[in-house]
Amino acid sequence: DAATTEIYPLSLHDALPTSLPEGSVNDLKLSDILPATSASILTPISATLVSVGSGISGTGIPAIGSAATLSDQTFSFDFGNVVNAADNISGNDSIVFEVVARAANDARNERGDLATNSGQMDWVTKLETGTLVAGTLSATASVRIVTPDLTLAKTVNPTTADGGDTVTYRLTVANPAATYATTAFNLNLLDSDLASLGFTNVTITGVTSSGA
């Protein structure tokens, strides 16, 4: 559970290509919406323009490497009015931008959940009659949420002791293999029982590790 377990940051590098129809389009906008729902949440980090097809031209096209504008969970690029050359070469029609996000340490992100973000391209085409027609293309990409699956057990030997006896407590933390489980980071182990029993000097005699 993301609310109670120290979850490592999981980054999603999602390159979303979009193919622009050939011809002239107005008000071209590219956007990517990261999820923030009751089922999953991804924290925005960055979005960068990676490439623009050689057939696409316009005065408002951002420079390669430009950062997107972020509003809440949505990254966006405004391209303005552009022309996509009618060369019938699909490789010249693509715009690629990369979105980087992080799986939030949040109760909504549970092991095995799919967090899906949506990329979208919107534009307006002006017909010969003067009629404006809106166009949209979209794509999605998902990342699977993985979390540690920790267990903690504590034993004492012997279970009864006289003054001067040595008592051994054993705390065992395990992270067994499980579907969509992963390594736990920044693990802190605290035993408050010993202090409450009046122990003032506690020595850790050994720590063993096996597995994740």
Image (tube, rainbow, N blue to C red):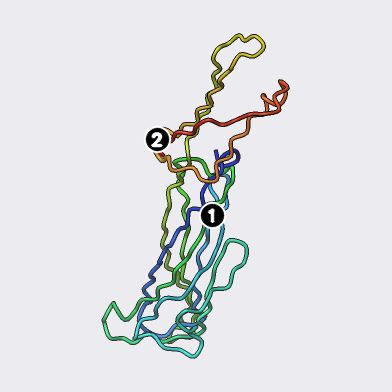
Q: Amino acid at mark 1?
A: Leu
- For this view, does 87 lie left or right of residue 97? left
Figure quadrant of the N terminus: top right
Does 207 sit above or below residue 58? Answer: above
Q: Residue furthest front?
A: 164
Residue annotated with mark 2: 210
Identified at 46% across, 71% down, the residue is 121
Q: Quadrant of residue 15?
A: bottom left
Does 200 sit above or below residue 76? Answer: above
Residue annotated with mark 1: 42
Q: Residue furthest left?
A: 88
Front in this rendered view, residue 131 or 144: 144
Identified at 56% across, 40% down, the residue is 5
Front in this rendered view, residue 177 or 130: 177
The location of residue 74, given as percent across then percent down, is 56, 64
What is the CA distance from the residue labelled 1 to the residue labelled 2? 32 Å
The location of residue 139, given as percent across then percent down, is 41, 62
